[in-house]
């Protein structure tokens, strides 16, 4: 048996076991899952020396490979970070269990009741390249929502991830979860991912978490549905009828509070009627915060020393202290502009006009549409979902921040007493 | 320009126009859409001679191609069938508009309101090989739910489909719908479908309606999410604690009331404790209805002249008066059996035992799970959804019968008054 065959066998066996675990996990009571999550948290803390020892192997390899100090910092686990991981599991244990919820029940004329029941999706694969805490977070959210999980982390963190996943699986099983609820692919061989992505018989959903090239590779290879998060090229539109002080506050917050994240503002649109009096204030405040501004010709007529924006700027997620600024002639033009150049992630209007607010809410085709609030609130925690497995920029199944409920599906249930069809 | 290039240009242009139409259609009021649907219905009736003339071209080609008389019957349009199509559009006009519904609203501690708003998916492509009435039905459901639709019907019905789609588009536009809300691909060239399935920039969802080979081709080719309906291999499990009269009624109905459809029963499981007394009754009644029975060894020990079932029988959707019958030792075994061999479409238990009913509901991993009712009720109309665009055997986005709501997605909306993130 050559290496590819043996990896195929390994990955297929993991997926097959996950399918078996998922059938059992779907029927596990919330209190058992929550006890298991707390036991996992305790185990991460009490056996932190094992995690730190595994992490040391990853760090040694990272240094030998010449990773940057920022990358090494992200990879590093210490007592504090392990405690944070454990606390995060305890928080998931406190969330409501979404599984089993029944809604939309109606009694049909023949007396039978038709309703929907929330059930786990089944087997979820998470493919990620981030810090080792994704291992514990993602596994916890999947288990809490009744899904078996297959984890595939980045090769830099393989020893850390393996140890974390193994401790969680062991603690979970002792607390009553089915075996193989949490599995990590124990090889860094690149062929494992394409193999996994073909196993639609065993795996129901793939969530890639990482950069665009990772996501594009997963989408291209996958025979399994993928929920993905592409760019967050977020727009703020300041309407003719905006409160300028509120607008300025929101602009500063959306651009500068944390510029490197997906819900930071990347482009500002101004109604042309306010450019003359409002743009100079914006420029002054943002320049004081170190923001580079790239502007359209209409804006440069007012503040001539702004760098000119190209069409590419309207499409760009800078993730940095750079802002594109454009003027538009109307609300409709703003909506068209955002639908054309934005990334359909999160876009906001600042306005005092009720009709404008309602038109913007309906017309902008994005996962999150805000009135008079900073785009930085686009986040599962800020939305009150309690947690976040990711943000979907897709339209099907889940759109926007994904919490526990987005890791479930539904079935129709019919409660009859002998009905037959005439 | 060669033929493939010109078809690529044609299909891309259709998809691009559909995207444009979808942006406008998302904001059209319900009363405009409903008026348009009624105008389309009137147009189909008042201009039925055009439809019948186009249909005559299809029928002529069908006879020349040697299609069976059953196929020719399915293809044939007459005054009565056109009236039925028009009535169906008028019924869709009476349904509630799902678009704009706001739910799950919560006020966050900082005073902003976070909620979900139901919005159209955008552009939906329907690829079908069925009767021409799918053209009008599918277009009506897409438009009602605010989606632009691209239709691709079978080549046998191309003239009928083109005329129906053109009349509907024309009547819709006159009534205020955006141009290009309803488009049909005006060529039978096979290369059009793979081209369409790559246009993920313009098309949000593909729904194939037809046989397994059509669906598999679409899934293999598509870069766009697909919602599909594979087999309906439906099971009925008669529990140890079932009312035998009720069980018999349900069995007869599920198997014989309309055996050629996806929600007919294909396999009957009996708890082994009831095989001796119950199986002979089942065999007698079903044989009188002309049903062929293929049974496991345990069953054949009781009724020896039954044909033996092979493992393949447990997986087979007969769509005919054939039934596989097996004995199981327990409820858990029944659930495992159904999860292993069934098609996850619709499965039923007959039982008087409350705990068994609840365990079956949770444990069977199917789109529809019934207690004490015939599987034949698995249908959007019977579920009270008012209509059905199809039945999904997928788990993501939509599962089971799909109505108008399943042709929508959601966005998060945030209503603030100047909130910024700290």
Image (tube, coloured by chain):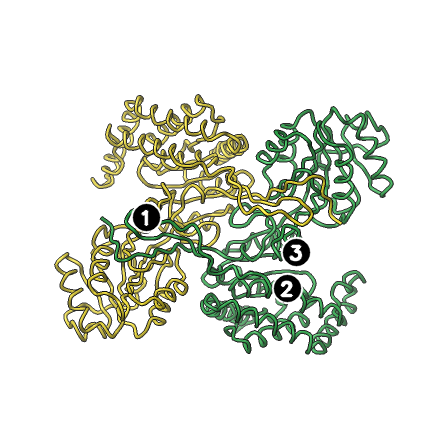
Chain colours: A yellow, B green
Marks 3 and 1 sit apart, C-alpha to C-alpha, by 47 Å
**Residue B33 falls in image quadrant:** bottom right
Marks 2 and 1 sit apart, C-alpha to C-alpha, by 41 Å
Q: Are marks 2 and 1 on the same chain?
A: yes
Name the spot of residue A161 as percent of width and height, x first: 35, 32
- Of residues A421 and A165, the one nearer the viewer is A421
Disc 2 chain ID: B
**From this viewpoint, is residue B14 visible?**
yes
**From this viewpoint, is residue A1 visible?**
no
Q: Residues within 10 Å of mark 1 (few under 14, many from 20)?
A: few
**Residue B201 falls in image quadrant:** bottom left
Secondary structure beneath disc 1?
loop
Q: Residues within 10 Å of mark 2 (few under 14, many from 20)?
A: some
The numbered dot on residue B195 is: none
Disc 3 chain ID: B
Name the spot of residue A403 as percent of width and height, x first: 40, 43
The numbered dot on residue B108 is: 1
Residue located at (72% from left, 38% from top): B267
A296 lies left or right of B362:
left
**Residue A137 falls in image quadrant:** top left
B312 lies left or right of A258:
right
- Of residues B308 and A374, the one nearer the viewer is A374
The mark that comes first in sequence, 2 or 1, is: 2
Name the spot of residue B71 as percent of width and height, x first: 76, 61
Secondary structure beneath disc 2?
helix
The mark that comes first in sequence, 2 or 3, is: 2
**Do the CB atoms of the residues marked 2 and 1 lie less than 8 Å apart?**
no
Residue behind mark 3 = B210
Compared to residue B353, the image places residue A116 above or below, namely below
A16 lies left or right of A288:
right
Secondary structure beneath disc 3?
loop
Disc 1 chain ID: B
């Amino acid at each position: 048996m050559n290496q590819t065959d043996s990896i195929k066998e390994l990955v297929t066996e993991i997926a097959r076991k996950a399918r078996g675990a998922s059938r059992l996990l779907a029927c596990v009571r919330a209190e058992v899952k929550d006890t298991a999550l707390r036991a996992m948290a305790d185990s991460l803390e009490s056996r932190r020396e094992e995690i730190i020892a595994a992490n040391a192997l990853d760090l040694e390899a990272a240094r030998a490979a010449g990773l940057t100090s920022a990358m090494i910092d992200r990879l590093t686990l210490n007592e504090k970070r392990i405690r944070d991981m454990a606390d995060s599991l305890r928080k998931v244990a406190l969330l409501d269990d979404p599984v089993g919820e029944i809604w939309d029940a109606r009694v049909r004329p023949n007396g039978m009741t038709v309703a929907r029941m929330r059930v786990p999706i089944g087997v979820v694969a998470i493919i990620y390249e981030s810090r080792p805490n994704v291992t514990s977070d993602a596994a916890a959210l999947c288990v809490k929502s009744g899904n078996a999980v297959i984890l595939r982390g980045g090769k830099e963190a393989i020893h850390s991830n393996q140890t974390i996943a193994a401790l969680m699986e062991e603690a979970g099983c002792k607390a009553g979860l089915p075996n193989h609820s949490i599995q990590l692919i124990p090889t860094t061989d690149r062929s494992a991912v394409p193999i996994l992505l073909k196993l639609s018989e065993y795996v129901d959903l793939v969530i890639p978490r990482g950069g665009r090239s990772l996501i594009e590779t997963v989408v291209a290879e996958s025979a399994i549905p993928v929920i993905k998060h592409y760019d967050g090229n977020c727009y703020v539109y300041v309407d003719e009828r905006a409160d300028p002080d509120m607008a300025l506050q929101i602009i500063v917050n959306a651009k500068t509070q944390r510029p490197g994240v997906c819900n930071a503002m990347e482009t500002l649109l101004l109604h042309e009627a306010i450019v003359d009096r409002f743009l100079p204030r914006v420029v002054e405040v943002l320049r004081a915060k170190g923001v580079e501004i790239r502007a359209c010709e209409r804006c440069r007529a007012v503040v001539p020393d702004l760098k000119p924006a190209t069409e590419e700027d309207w499409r760009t997620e800078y993730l940095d202290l750079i802002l594109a600024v454009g003027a538009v002639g109307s609300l409709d033009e703003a909506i068209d502009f955002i639908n054309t150049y934005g990334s359909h992630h999160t876009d906001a209007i600042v306005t005092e006009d009720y009709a404008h607010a309602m038109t913007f809410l309906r017309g902008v085709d994005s996962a999150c549409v805000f009135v008079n609030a900073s785009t930085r609130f686009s986040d599962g925690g800020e939305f009150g979902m309690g947690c976040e497995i990711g943000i979907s920029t897709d339209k099907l199944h889940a759109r926007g921040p994904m919490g526990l409920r987005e890791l479930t599906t539904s079935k129709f249930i019919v409660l009859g007493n002998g009905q037959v069809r005439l």
